[in-house]
Image: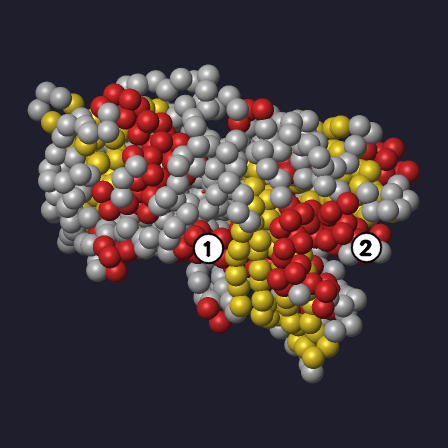
Amino acid sequence: MSAPDASQPLKPLDVRSVGTSPQRVDGPAKVTGRAPYAWEHTLPGPVFVHPLQAAVARGRVVVMDTGQAEALEGVLAVLTPDNAPRLADTGDAELAVLQSREVAFRGQFIGAVIAETPEVARQAAQLVGVEYEQQPHDTELSTERTDLYRPETVTPGDPPDSDDGDVDAALAAAPVSIDVTYRTPMEHNNPMEPHTSVAVWEEGPGTGPQLTVYDSTQGAHLVRQMLAPLFGLPPERVRVVSPHVGGGFGSKGMPHAHNVLAVMAAMLCGGRPAKLALTRQQMFSLTGHRTPTIQRVRLGADTRGRLTAVCHDVVEQTARIKEFAEQTGVHARMMYAADNRRTSHRLAALDTPVPSWMRAPGEAPGMAVSEAAMDELALACGLDPIELRVRNEPETDPETGRPWSGRHLVQCLRTGADRFGWDRRAEAGTRREGDWLVGLGVASSTYPVYVMPGTVAEIERRADGAGSPDGYAVRIGAVDLGTGTWTALTQIAADALNCPFEDVRLEIGDTDLPPASVAGASSGINTWGTTVVAAARAFREEHGEAPAPGASTRASTPSDPDLENYAAHSFGAQFAEVRVHSGTGEIRVPRMLGVFAAGRIINPRTARSQLIGGMIMGMSMALFEESVFDHGTGHVINHDFAQYHIPTCADVQDIDAIWLDEPDLHANPMGSKGIGEIGIVGSPAAVVNAVHNATGIRVRDLPITPDKLL
Ligand code: MOS
């Protein structure tokens, strides 16, 4: 492996394919049924796994009567906490599946049926008689709880609290101030493809077991890294295959309990593939959720609308058995110029399923609130909301003091204002068209630039003569969860190798390929693209412009000493128009516009799709999504698409995402910053603010359903 010189940032990529919009490389395979999701790999002689789930929210299984289930024709085995394989490592309580009879949340796995068909497995699961010793459970988040605690860190490793200047004094002295508390609900990721794991456990003669998992994941190598120690295997005895993934939004960022259950089933089935796909309803207890939050925001400003104090205090939940601490208030440390800034995060550890990543964890729920609070402050100051934001632009990062690698928020706001017709915005509650109240709203958006360690790419001059004889194979264990990785990474590789797009054969989605970081935190293309560029440069140095067939080179992600000197974030301005029916409270969103400064856009076609997808998910946060948790039974009662509402095509009307031409060459050689999450950040607040502008009603409890406006 060649090590690029770590003291020098990589020189900018000379772009030709990057910035154009080739159609999706995986498109033809997807529309012709040749792009398998995890369930769809053709494997001989599969068995089918149907989980048994706890029907109490806390307690202990005392009886599991499996006789009737085992007697059903086609049943191969019934797994229980008594007969399940023992794991070599039980340190992660979410993954310590069937290692005890304790029940930590309703819906937790307490067993599974393995059968010849999915139907028999499901029927048999209903025949298992379970008795519990039930204990009282506690699932209700509130600021009154006496057991709220400060976590050591919030994800992805930030301090839970910050305190700069003297917030209390500044608030007391501020001529204008607001003190508002908002609530955001529990929410669930609902990717198109439910979480699926197909495991094959083969006992090789003399070589020890080999595990293969066909998985629906955002990180094949991370699944390997986390599963291997549970089963006492060295990582190289575990292969994870995930060439195509039907969405994840963070819920497939780490393996969950179903991965472990599938492998346990495979261990008992003598080399036969064990197939487990969670049902939509099962996903609501087993694949993570966005924590509900209670956020108190206090802002103080001088008479000209310049912030003197920003205070953002967050109360949220985690699970009793495993901590997940969402970084909800962290953005407030860097977003606006104010000398006095304080943030805090407090958690309640509850008898709920384990929360986890959901698109823009932290920024999405945090800015849904802080950007609505900025709208409230604008009103209190008698200022236009855009003008308020412009007056609070920090020249450097207030948190670190570093210069911005590129901050073009004001340009995004002004460009959006022109395009959206912001000058048509009226005083709150004054614009009426027939029975409809009409309003416009705006919010800012930001998301950090992350580059993950530990990725390696390999370039090989193709010797197979397939397709173009001049081609290259580019191998990297990245995944495409539907976002466009197959296409964007091919474009980057083509430019890095100075060859046509068609001459690159990308290979991703398999741990047999060199290791790659997870497709999360909008870091995928930043990390993998940088690594592909490094590998291409190393390849040219080693093999020149006319390499022999079979010549190959590997390189790992270079550290970038330049980037560390800057505060690197994407920015955006989100605009929404809403219409609220004065009689029924029905809310429509006829127009949304997002203007982003997110570095160089690799592929405008796939980027626009990703950005408007995020904006729609943000509108959904504002108006639709809420996992209704019943504290009596301890589970989500609206656990299906009939009752957990997400937008349909009829809810999305005129929506567009545009961007500034802003290559950020401090970020990486492509000049890109990542676009997976910024679309969802700020868009909820734009809708919330537009609802206020339409009606004059400030709703501080999301989602805004019609009843809250009547
Ligand atoms: Mo994203 S929630 O980091 O997959």
How packed is label 2: few (under 14 Cα within 10 Å), some, or many (20 or more)? some
Would residue 678 be seen by someone viewing this image from the given angle? no
How packed is label 1: few (under 14 Cα within 10 Å), some, or many (20 or more)? some
* Amino acid of disc 2: Leu
What secondary structure is found at the residue carrying circle 1? Answer: helix
Seen as rendered, the residue at the extreme left is 205
The residue lying toward the viewer, choosing from 379 and 457, is 457
Tell whether 478 sits left or right of 266: right
Whether label 1 touches label 2, CB < 8 Å: no
Residue at 43%, 37% (x, y): give it. Answer: 670
Query: Where's residue 554, x and y in %?
Result: 28, 24
* Amino acid of disc 1: Arg
Please, is residue 562 above or below residue 283 in the view? Answer: above
Query: Where's residue 199, x and y in %?
Result: 23, 39
The residue lying toward the viewer, choosing from 427 and 623, is 427
Query: Where's residue 4, x and y in %?
Result: 37, 20
What secondary structure is found at the residue carrying circle 2? Answer: loop
Please, is residue 422 above or below residue 524 in the view? Answer: below
Please, is residue 524 above or below residue 390 in the view? Answer: above
Residue marked by disc 2: 383
Residue marked by disc 1: 608
